[in-house]
Amino acid sequence: MGRMKEEFMRLSEEPLMDPCPECQGAGTVEYDVARPQSFDRDVGYLDTSVENCETCAGSGEMERLCKCGEWVTQIRGEDATVCEECV
């Protein structure tokens, strides 16, 4: 009975993870950087730069949240969209 209780507690405490909507699960975001005209460059151009995604902190995943703001945990199943309190 102890192992079943531990498994139940693990499933009810771990949130379901979804891909980050900002970086689509990559963990990095590419953005444009303007390189202006200067004394040694006759024309300006757009360059690209890559940084870690600020929304997911570079992990590529975010916790699935219910409309009330609580985590949707694994105890409800992979297709769950609401938390235990909102059921």
Image (cartoon, rainbow, N blue to C red):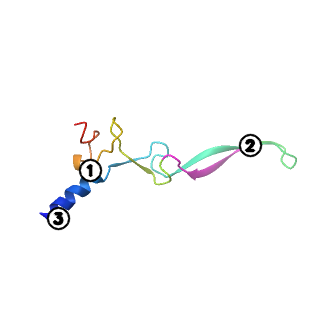
Residue shown at 45%/49% (left/top)? Answer: 25
Q: Which residue is mark 3?
A: 3
Q: Is residue 52 left or right of residue 25?
A: right
Name the mark on residue 45. 2
Part of the protein shown in magenta: 45-55
Callout 2 amino acid: Tyr
Residue shown at 33%/36% (left/top)? Answer: 68
Front residue of 39 and 66:
66
Q: Residue furthest right?
A: 39
Callout 1 amino acid: Gln
Q: Tell whether position 84 is magenta.
A: no
Front residue of 15 and 33:
15
- Secondary structure of residue under mark 2: strand
Q: Is residue 50 left or right of residue 1?
A: right
Callout 3 amino acid: Arg
How far is the residue under mark 3 from the one under mark 1? 17 Å
Q: Tell me residue 81's x, y (percent).
A: 29, 39
Q: Tell whether position 51 is magenta.
A: yes
- Secondary structure of residue under mark 3: helix
Q: Are marks 1 and 2 in contact (CB under 8 Å)?
A: no
Vertical side of 67 occupied by 46: above or below: below
